[in-house]
Structures are given as structure tokens and as C-alpha cells.
Image (spheres, helix red, strand yellow):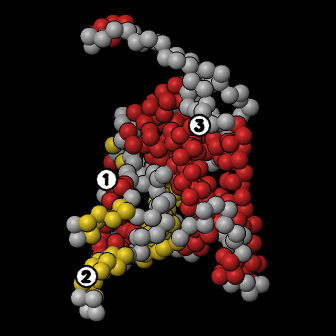
Amino acid sequence: MSFPSDSNRAAPDAAPTRSVSFLDAAARGLAPPAPPTPERPRLDEATASRFADVYRRLVAEIEKAFVGQRELVVGTLVALFSGGHVLVESVPGLGKTLFAQALGRALGCQFGRVQFTPDLTPSDVVGALVFNAKEQEFVFRPGPIFTQILLADEINRSPAKTHAALLEATQEGAATIDGQTRPLPRPFFTIATQNPIESEGTYRLPEAQLDRFMFKLVADYPNVEEELKILVAHGNNVDIKTKLDAIQPVLSAAKVLKLTALVDDVYVAPQLFDYVVKIVRATRDFPRLAFGASPRAGLALVQGARVLAAFRGRNYATPDDVVPLVLPTLRHRVVLSPEAEIEGRRVDDVLTALLRSIETPRL
């Protein structure tokens, strides 16, 4: 995933209309639709500029403790303000826990962590009713899921029954314990991690659960400059707690929710909707892919493009906001064909070829 610089495109004055065949409408027994009313961005430019400033400040604060991995940082923030969740795949020791802690502090939100293990039960995640002998009644003891920024570490080390405890939380923002549904704190954002190189003692996440994650982000080894910076910083005997304490909250939980609500006001032109639909539908019959993406992938692309546009200070989205999000959105939602696996193809390479086969619209 890369985040290219913005093109010098002007904001559209009005959304172009799309022609609909009279015969198509007549075949459905409908009258030809009237031309739609031209739309304009509902998010004013000043607010979009402030959104970009908040984004820059968040990144600056996170980087006080966490070095590099810009794609992980940006992808996570896009998912957060889109109301989604992320699955992070990386080898151990790249600082995922540190990043999640730094993110929670910069956002001014509560942070919690669950280490998934084979013996972890659903009640260990969501909580349980505990008998209070003094009061002679059962009281609810919330589990670690009752937080705002949740790190679900090595999620694939627990069986499916424990995975299921997260499904309701990530989709509904609530957890049901003993028949009673309890809302989770808002915002609720999950960063789940998994190790790609060790399969012993792991449980593969089913496609239905993978589809619940807005993005699958791949964290790679740092480059030479970043690794040197990490070594120098830790060689100065500055512990992690001191680094985290240096992070100043940029937002609060209430402000995060307010900014998230503003994202829907970023303008998306009809041509961009068509572009996203073409990308998603192409995954269903593209060579080397056995199974394609669901409509949920299109929703993630559109909403993510809105957030990325706001991060860049614009109140309208362009193809430059869609393209960097294609791999994170689709890599966990498609399945390679047996031929592609035999040939040693990578999902990212196939998706890159797919994207190049689709004409980019000019807005």
C-alpha cells in the first residue's frame, strides 16, 4: 500500500449525471428516471483543512514513540475514522503493541489488550457474571473488550469459539453476556494481529470473520534509517513508558466520534462509485482468483477514500484516494485459484494486475 501525492485536480462543481436506458427502465415496468439534482460537497473546505491538521498532529505524536511503518499508521487511522477495524499481519518484534498504545494515547482514548492463547475462553474476552457473597447477588465483571482501542494480539492462536466473541463487538459495538446485551464504549476500534510465519498452534480465521475487518495491513521490516533510529533511541536508555508519557492527546473520545461523523460529508462523484464497483466486481471473474470480494469491500473502499481525502485536506474524493486502499481492502477478501498457488503467485501481485486492467476515471 502506498499513499501517492495528490493530483492537482479541482473540486467538481456538480456531479455529472449518468444516462439510464429507456428500454432497461421499460423492461422493469418503470418510467425513465429524472436527472438527479447536482450534488456538491457538504463538508466545507475549512473543516477539511482542520481534519488534515488533526491527522498530521496524530502522526507526529505517534512517532514520538513508534518509528516508521507509515503504511500501518495511515491505514489504521483511515480505518478508525471510517468506523472499521484492522487485521495486522507481521512477524514478531515490529512494535505492534507499542503502536497500539501510542495510538490510544494520541487519540485520548482508553487502551486495552488481549493476548489470544489456545486456552482463552469467550468469557475471558467479554467478561462474566461473578457472585458477590457480601451482597448475595451476581455482578458483572467486564472483560478487556470493554475499552475503546483494543489490541487483539495473535488472534489466530485461539479457537473459533473465542473468535466468535469478537464478531458481535466488531459489527454491533456490543457484547452479549448471559442473555443481556451490553454496549461497548465508543469509539470501539480493534487492531487484531497475526503471525504469518508460524502455523503450529494456530487456527485459521474463517472468511466470514476476515470480511469483518475493513483492512488487512502488512507490516514489514523497517528500512535502514528506521532501524538505526530505533537502535539509537533505545540505546539512550529511554524506556517505553517514558516515550509513551511524552505523547500528548490530540483528541478525545467525543472528538473522534465527531470527526468520524463528518466523513460522510466528503463528496464522492458518480464516476468514482462506478470505479469502485468495477474493481470489486472484477475480483469475481479475474484470472488467478477463485473467489472474489463481497459488496462490503466496495463500502470499505468508498468510506476509506473519503477519510483519506479528508486527511489530505480535501472535501471530495478522487481515484488517488481509492487506489492506495485497494490492496488493504481486498487482500483478505479474495482467494487465489489452485493454479495461482501452484505458480507461487502472491495475492497482492494478482490484485495489482487487476487494478491496472481497469481504466481510471478522470474527474
Judge from the rendering whether residue 99 lies leftward or rightward of residue 191; answer left or right: right
Determine whether the residue tagged by mark 2 lies in a helix, strand or loop. strand
Q: What residue sits right under mark 2 in the picture?
A: 138
Please, what is the three-letter code of the amino acid marked with disc 1? Ala
Q: Residue at x 45, y 30 (%)?
A: 278
Determine whether the residue tagged by mark 3 lies in a helix, strand or loop. loop
Q: Residue at x 36, y 48 (%)?
A: 335
Residue 189: x %, y % from top left: 48, 61
Q: What residue sits right under mark 3 in the picture?
A: 266
> Which image quarter: residue 109?
bottom right
Mark 2 or mark 3: which is in front?
Answer: 2
User: Is any part of residue 36 visible from this angle?
Assistant: yes
Mark 1 or mark 3: which is in front?
Answer: 3
Instruction: Please report whichever mark, 2 or 3, sits nearer to the chain's N-terminal start.
Output: 2
Of residues 48 and 24, the one nearer the viewer is 48
Instruction: Please report whichever mark, 1 or 3, sits nearer to the chain's N-terminal start.
Output: 1
Residue 56: x %, y % from top left: 71, 55
Q: Residue at x 52, y 36 (%)?
A: 355
Mark 1 → mark 2, Cα distance in angstroms: 34 Å
Mark 2 → mark 3, Cα distance in angstroms: 47 Å
Q: Which mark is residue 208?
A: 1
**For residue 143, above or below residue 299:** below
> Which image quarter: residue 314?
top right
Judge from the rendering whether residue 64 lies leftward or rightward of residue 283; answer left or right: right
Instruction: Please report whichever mark, 1 or 2, sits nearer to the chain's N-terminal start.
Output: 2
Give neighbour class at mark 2: few <14, some 14-19, many 20+ (Cα, 10 Å).
few
Mark 1 or mark 2: which is in front?
Answer: 2
Please, what is the three-letter code of the amino acid marked with disc 3? Val
Mark 1 → mark 3, Cα distance in angstroms: 29 Å
Q: Locate the C terminus and report the quarter of the image it occupies.
A: top right
